[in-house]
Every structure is written in structure tokens, then in C-alpha cells.
Image: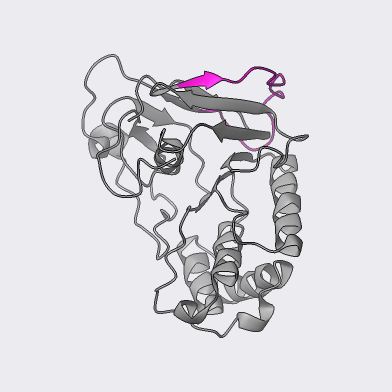
Amino acid sequence: MLRGVDLDLPAHALVRIEGANGTGKSALLRLLAGIDAPSEGRITGRGARMAYVPERFPAALPFTAAGYLVHLGRIHGLRTSEAADRARSRLARFGAAAHARTPLPELSKGTSQKVAVAQALLAEPELLILDEAWTGLDTVARDGLDRAVAERVAAGATVVFVDHDPRRLAGAVDAVFRIEGNGLLAASGTRPRRRARGYGSRRRARPARRSPPDCRAIRGTRPWPTGACGSPSRPRTPTRCCAPCSPPDRPGTSAG
């Protein structure tokens, strides 16, 4: 259970989250993504275009690979033709074009992961959150994801990731934070943050000093509708949600 988290995520930055198994890495990413609601505090400045690759992709969905991407593209506000074009492009980029018409439940674990990564890049997200996204990918797809991350950061996005390989993107990371004792610490050797530039504001997660009102009551913000993958779709109003510290105990939210 996370407590007292105060995290500033500037635009145009690559941020790594570390910690032992079970410390709450995945829980923190789900809070940043808006999947889970915090028990206290607030999250501010989350961009309208946000994408999330979960640790476990729910492949048992009634879509083909391409149909799933088109569906999520529509949720992100893309026209059907544009969503279809991007679906083909993203599947080809990660070596899954041959499986475009394959039902999701029939895909191998590795191909399912390629679809999960492809959906996260559909709408050119301003905030990209990756929870062990490289796991299960072949070498070509891993390299493709490395390049995609670099492209998003260069375009001004914030990318936050967790990965079991300490060498992952080691030379490109702007900041490293480690979860210890239910708190979040800046890791030693972290490079100075780049100056925030590009599209937007800083994203800040910090504990509240007193009990906040219900999330839905803050500035008229409504809960995000949920896409088929469990990731939130585009918010209808600017996001200013009461923020994270200890998520409720439920499967998948506390495992690191």
C-alpha cells in the first residue's frame, strides 16, 4: 500500500519506477493512468491523450486484433477510417500484421502483447504508461517499442515505465524512482530532469492534507469511461482527480 507519494512528472521525460516484487509498482502506474482511484490526495495535469499497457493483457475479448484497435481508436476520438489505418500501421510495426483478423483469444501470448503495445500508441499519447510492456515480445518488437518510446519523448510526451530488466532504456532515462517502505524515493544517480517543454503541464501526484471530496465532485470531473482493455478512454472534462496513495485491496492493484 502506497502512502505519502509526491511525484512530479514533467513533459518530455522518460521516468523509470523500480522496487521489489509486491511493493506497489503496478498500483502506482494504475493510479497514474486513472484506472484505480486514490484513497486520498490528488493527481493533476493528466493530459487528454493517455495510454496504458497493463502487466497482463486481457486477451479474452470479443474482437479480432484489428477490430480491437479500431474500437479503441474510436474511443480515443479517431474517425473509423483513421483508426483502421493506424491499426494496420501499428500492427505492422510490431510484426503482427498477419494476425490482424485473428480473434484475440486465439493469439499467442507474444502476439497478444504486441496488440497491447499497438493499442497504446494509436492516439500518439501525451502520457504513456508501460507496465512490463516488453515482456513476451520478440527482439524485433522490443526494439520497435524502444524506438516508439524515444519518439514519444522527443515529441514532448511523458513516458513512465516498469521493467524487470535493469538495462532497459538505461541510457535514455531522465529520472528513476524506487518504491521502498510504502514510499517513493528518487534513486541515486538519477540525471537532472530535462526542462519541461512540448505539449503540456507537469503531472503531479501528492497526498492531501485533509480528506478530499469525492473524485466526481471536483470541478465537475466525471469518472473516465473504460475501454475494452481496462484502460480509460479520453476524459470528457479536464482531469483533476483526487489522488493516490493507498488503493483499495483488490487483485492486480498491489502487485509490483
Across and down, in percent, residue 206 comes to 40, 22
Q: Quadrant of the N terminus?
A: top left
Q: Quadrant of residue 176?
A: top right
Left or right side of 13 for 6: left
Across and down, in percent, residue 161 comes to 58, 41
Q: Residue furthest top?
A: 209
Provide the residue span drawn in magenta: 184-203
Q: Is residue 9 visible?
A: no
Q: Quadrant of residue 2?
A: top left
Q: In the image shown, does 143 or 67 lie closer to the viewer?
A: 143
Q: In the image shown, does 45 or 189 lie closer to the viewer?
A: 189
Name the chief secondary structure element in magenta: loop
Left or right side of 50 for 183: left
Q: Is residue 19 above or below residue 227?
A: above
* Residue 104 magenta: no
Across and down, in percent, residue 114 comes to 61, 66
Residue drawn at the location 46% of the way across and 62% of the way down: 57
